[in-house]
Amino acid sequence: MLDLAKGANAFIAGFGLLTRPGLRIFVVVPLLINVILFSLLIYFASEQFSDWVQIALNWLPGWLSFLDWLMWPLFALTIIIVLFFSFTIVANLIAAPFNGLLSEVCERQLLNDLGEAGQDVPFSWKELGLLVPRTLAREITKLLYFAPRALLLFIISWIPVINLIAPLLWALFGAWTMAIQYVDYPADNNKMSFRDMLTALKQRRFMSLGFGGCVSLLMLIPIVNLLIMPAAVTGATKLWVDERLQRQQSQTLATQAQA
């Protein structure tokens, strides 16, 4: 429970970090991206949503038709989760360079707060351009990790009876992917490989799910969800810095104990 709370609290703290001087500029572009994509998502979903649910219900065998009243909300919830999951992937792919630079600037500020010297990283279109190839390559790596797992869940969502647990599985998967998506920015900036980053998250699985679950939950709240992306980046960066400080303290205590 403590780890779940720690992960969630780090994300909430990300909103406060967005008001810091030097970070606001990195909120504007992701915010515009979110507004455009979210508007398109709402329009597209409103046009197709009922048809999608009906198609899903048609997959039920006739002898299970009496479960229509139960399956409709389950299918509807599953479709909503899949839509927001897809929206997040596209939005993060487009905003990845801005998010990488936001995380870098945020980490420098947090380290300065802790008394660790660090140079400011002012916004620069040149710097942003240099980040594009690296961040896009990292986003593709994440997509290759997410895609087969999402496909498996999608298949499960269409299997009668088994699909009763599909919304829960999608919710857990969504929380896990959100943790990976955003913690990867400070990890990448610190030259940690994707595999090592996954290992670190698995070692603190409940903290990761607490962070990612909070991101997924607030993403469903209109207006608030427009700020989710930059807040998740700064929140994940704070979580990274806090964990780094805790590791350093643990190593210091261990060294003192051995001495």
Image (cartoon, grey):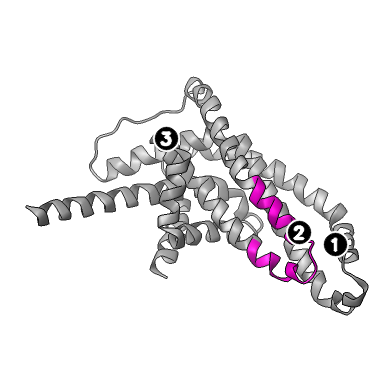
Query: Percent from the top left, x then y, of residue 200?
Result: 41, 50
| Visible residue check, residue 22 | no
Query: Percent from the top left, x then y, of residue 141?
Result: 57, 37
Q: Nearer the viewer, residue 33 or 67?
A: 67
Query: Percent from the top left, x then y, of residue 31?
Result: 60, 42
Q: Which mark is residue 189?
A: 3
Predominant SS of the magenta segment: helix
Q: 218 left or right of 165?
A: left
Which of labels 3 and 1 is toward the front?
Answer: 1
- Whichever of callouts 2 and 3 sits on the residue coming sooner in the sequence is 2
Query: Percent from the top left, x then y, of residue 193?
Result: 44, 37
Q: Is residue 74 above or below residue 208?
A: below
SS under mark 1: helix
Q: Is residue 91 above or below residue 256?
A: above
Q: 206 left or right of 91?
A: left
At a point 51% along the width and 46% down the height, the residue shown is 182
At a point 47% along the width and 33% down the height, the residue shown is 101
Q: Are marks 2 and 3 in contact (CB under 8 Å)?
A: no
SS under mark 3: helix
| Visible residue check, residue 107 | yes
SS under mark 2: helix
Count every numbered label the image shows and give the total: 3
Name the residue type under label 3: Asn
Q: Nearer the viewer, residue 99 or 207?
A: 207
> How many neighbours does mark 1 have within 10 angstroms: few (below 14), some (14-19), or many (20 or more)?
some
Q: Are marks 1 and 2 in contact (CB under 8 Å)?
A: yes
Circle 2 is placed at which residue position? Answer: 79
